[in-house]
Image: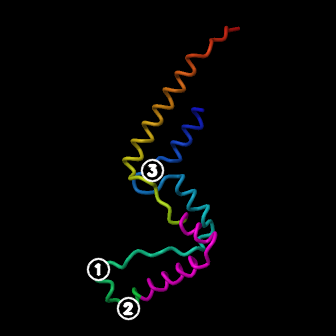
């Protein structure tokens, strides 16, 4: 129980500047070959005057919309590919640490209630 809990905590723990292993695994499972398009961010202020940048972004949006319109499993995969950790990293770390301490306490309590086996 403790090993499974520790592995789960490691998988869910978000790094400082990225996504947790669990979210990375979901994103990879959705698109292992990298073939699905991504919805691009809005152009920064001032870039809207650059026709090449606008056309490039519009082309990316059209590709995303075409994939979305395919429907079914493709929409689920597009959502999974854009998955993020559900909470800010600092909050998620605090919750995971609290869950880890609670699980360790429960495991210790369960282990202390078991009858001791005689040595030998």
Question: Magenta stretch: residue 32 in it?
Answer: no
**Residue at (35%, 89%) from the top-left corner?**
50
Q: Is the residue marked by circle 3 packed among few (<14), some (14-19), or many (20+) residues within 10 Å?
A: many
- Place of residue 21 in the rendered image (x, y in percent of width and height, measured from the top left): 53, 52
Give the Cα distance between marks 2 and 3.
38 Å
Q: State which tag comes first along the sequence, 2 or 3.
A: 3
Quadrant assignment for the C terminus = top right
Q: Name the residue under label 3.
A: 14
Q: Name the residue under label 1.
A: 45
Q: Mark 2 points at which residue?
A: 51
Q: Is mark 1 on a helix, strand or loop?
A: loop
**Residue at (54%, 75%) from the top-left corner?**
37
Give the Cα distance between marks 1 and 3.
31 Å
Which region of the structure is painted magenta? 55-80
- Place of residue 53 in the rendered image (x, y in percent of width and height, measured from the top left): 40, 86
The answer to whether residue 92 is above or below residue 63 is above
């Amino acid at each position: 129980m403790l090993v499974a809990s520790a592995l789960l905590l490691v998988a869910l723990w978000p790094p400082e500047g990225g996504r947790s292993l669990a979210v990375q695994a979901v994103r990879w499972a959705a698109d292992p070959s990298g073939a699905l398009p991504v919805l691009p961010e809005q152009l920064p202020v001032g870039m809207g005057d650059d026709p090449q940048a606008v056309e490039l972004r519009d082309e990316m949006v059209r590709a995303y919309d075409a994939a979305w319109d395919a429907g079914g499993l493709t929409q689920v995969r597009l959502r999974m590919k854009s998955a993020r950790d559900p909470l800010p990293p600092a909050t998620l770390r605090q919750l995971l640490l609290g869950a880890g301490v609670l699980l360790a306490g429960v495991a210790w309590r369960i282990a202390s209630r078991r009858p001791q086996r005689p040595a030998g």
